[in-house]
Image: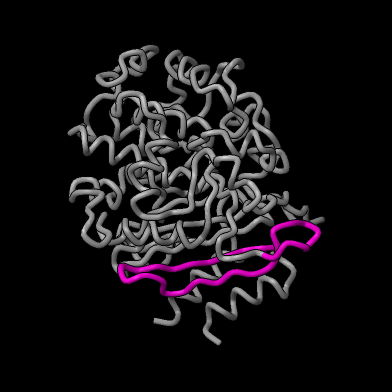
Amino acid sequence: MSALHEAFAKNFTSGREVGAAVSIFDANGVVESLHGGFCDAARTVPWKPETLVLIWSATKGLAVACALHAMESAGVEMDAKVGELWPEFAQAGKNNLTFAHVLSHRAGLCALDSKSATLLDHESVIRALEAQVPLRGLDDAPAYGPRVFGFILDEIVRRLSGGETLGAYWRRVFAEPLGLDIWIGLPEEFHPRVATILPPRVQPGSPPDAFAVAFSDPDSLTRRAFSSLAGAPPPSGMNSSRIRSASLPSLGGIGSAVSLAKFYAMLAAGGRHGANMFFGEKAFRWMTTRLAQGFDGVLQMEAAYSAGFMMDPVDVGTRKIRSLLGPSVSAFGHAGAGGSLAFADPERGIGFAYVMNQMELGVLPNDRCLSLVHAFYSEG
């Protein structure tokens, strides 16, 4: 049994998984693909290769790819001002914000002051964003936008594509050509294939980390960012048909590990899949170049971002401070609440994806997921 198989099986025997899947693809296809467990809390519906599951903020990686594709196609540069595309955005001190600022979480738009903006009303969020004064300066460290960020990407795509929503753009440009079972706004006919999301189990006596302490403070930037937008349901509420069908580019993507790994393998190959080129060299540089690094006041940890993707932070010698995305310094991707993770490793030419339905506590994937990453790379 390979190290990856052993690590995957151990997560089940230790009781940490209910249902999960991990897949690794390269340009030639599947490298590894494992699945196991059950789609429901009662453990009556087996997890299958085609099982779909909510990937939470790992959706942002897909949304970023849509925005970068639309920008590259329209000839929009990273140092262009967002207000030139979206004039209303330039209000309230945001006239000098560039796409680089916005995409690398340096725009100070991690939270909204508005109490009327709601998760399922795109226009209400956009109007609130337009009126929002940046909460941080341009020279400050990045501050992650857990809920608001996806709406900004959606509006950028709509303005560059003549009104097409990001969810529709995703299906037309990437999912359908690549044959991916991933949706941002899932058609009702596919709902029976979706695994039930199970809330994190509270571990009695576990000391709170910096994120948990900040989140418990109603006045903290962390709490404000994760509480922005009225109508956001608790984890169990994400299982509703209404939420599954909603186009939520920040946190509503639903798909399979196989499709997610296949997509990131295309990104790892510089945007090429077979004879098709989805991205040019410029967009690939946007994905693999760190635009921001520093102590993220929302996540309460050192963080690094390229043009919308998470990257592992590095020290002055370009050695990794944290290895969420494997050993490659150029790896990029995105994590999701509860433990999901997907990333591209251009050095190895692989796409990695891990998804599950039993959430665990923590702002980034913990050792349950990282054991799989480490096991894969340990095999050489």
- 229 or 47, which lies in front? 47
- Tell me the magenta residue range: 18-46
Residue at (30, 67) in percent of width and height: 27
Residue at (30, 29) in percent of width and height: 161
**Rendering coords of residue 139 (x, y %):** 34, 32
Location of the C terminus by quadrant is bottom left
The magenta stretch spans residue 234? no
- Tell whether 116 sits left or right of 341: right
Q: State which quadrant residue 44 falls in.
A: bottom right
**Rendering coords of residue 203 (x, y %):** 78, 56
Residue 313 visible in the picture = no
- 359 or 142, which lies in front? 359
**Rendering coords of residue 29 (x, y %):** 36, 70
Identify whether 117 is placed above or below 34: above
Q: State which quadrant residue 114 falls in.
A: top right
- 316 or 379, which lies in front? 379
Residue at (51, 34) in percent of width and height: 247
